[in-house]
Image (spheres, rainbow, N blue to C red):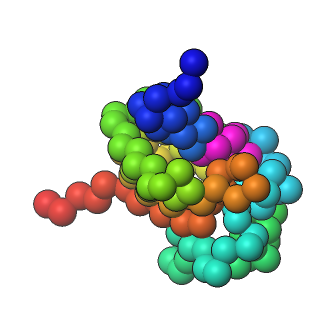
Amino acid sequence: MASTSTEHVETDERDVLGAIRAFIRTFENFDVDAMVAAWDDKAEQIVYQPEERAAPMFSIAEIREYAKTLPTFFVKATDVSLIDKKVLVVGGATAHVYIRLSCDIELTSGRHINGQLRQSFMLTKRDGAWRLVHYHESRQSDFD
């Protein structure tokens, strides 16, 4: 039986979210090589903006150096709860993803950052695998 368009979209969405979950696991395991491998090293431009950095990273080399520093400030994320997500796969080769979640982040200083985290991703499919080309995260700020 031939797959339907809906099945193809569901498969793409599942695979895209799987690639994002694998990327997030690299933080839990402090796996520098896997974090770097999650990115499309052939993309014309990449952008990685973690919430704790003032400036984004635009190269695989910068991401590798950043990943090496994770154990100096990050311990773990706990109480992670998905609030909502939106996944758009375009033409089977590009995906835009928005995720909003709540979590508690424990830092090596003993400080905890609790609250909502917003994440946006863009992925491309190259050689049959979804790879990151854009990742931005931010927290909801108080504007009282």
Q: Position of residue 73 (x, y in %)?
A: 68, 57
Q: Is residue 99 visible?
A: no
Which secondary structure class fits the magenta region best? Answer: helix
User: Residue 135 versus residue 92: which sits nearer the camera?
Assistant: 92
Residue ID at (44%, 55%):
90
The answer to whether residue 83 is above or below residue 138 is: above
Q: Looking at the image, which residue sits at the far top? A: 1
Q: Looking at the image, which residue sits at the far right? A: 33
User: Residue 25 versus residue 94: which sits nearer the camera?
Assistant: 94
User: Residue 86 versus residue 137: which sits nearer the camera?
Assistant: 86
Residue ID at (56%, 56%):
93
In this picture, which residue range is highlighted in magenta?
18-27
Q: Quadrant of residue 125?
A: bottom right
Q: Quadrant of residue 22?
A: top right
Q: Position of residue 4 (x, y in %)?
A: 46, 29
Q: Is residue 65 left or right of residue 9?
A: right
Residue ID at (81%, 51%):
34
Q: Looking at the image, which residue sits at the far front? A: 1
Does 24 lie within the magenta span? yes
Q: Position of residue 113 (x, y in %)?
A: 47, 47
The answer to whether residue 66 is above or below residue 44 is: above
Work out which quarter of the rendered image holds the N terminus and state it. Answer: top right
User: Residue 17 versus residue 100: which sits nearer the camera?
Assistant: 17
Q: Is residue 123 left or right of residue 137?
A: right
Work out which quarter of the rendered image holds the C terminus and state it. Answer: bottom left
Q: How many numbered marks are there? A: 0
Does 50 lie within the magenta span? no
Q: Is residue 120 visible?
A: yes
Q: Position of residue 106 (x, y in %)?
A: 59, 43
Residue ID at (70%, 65%):
40
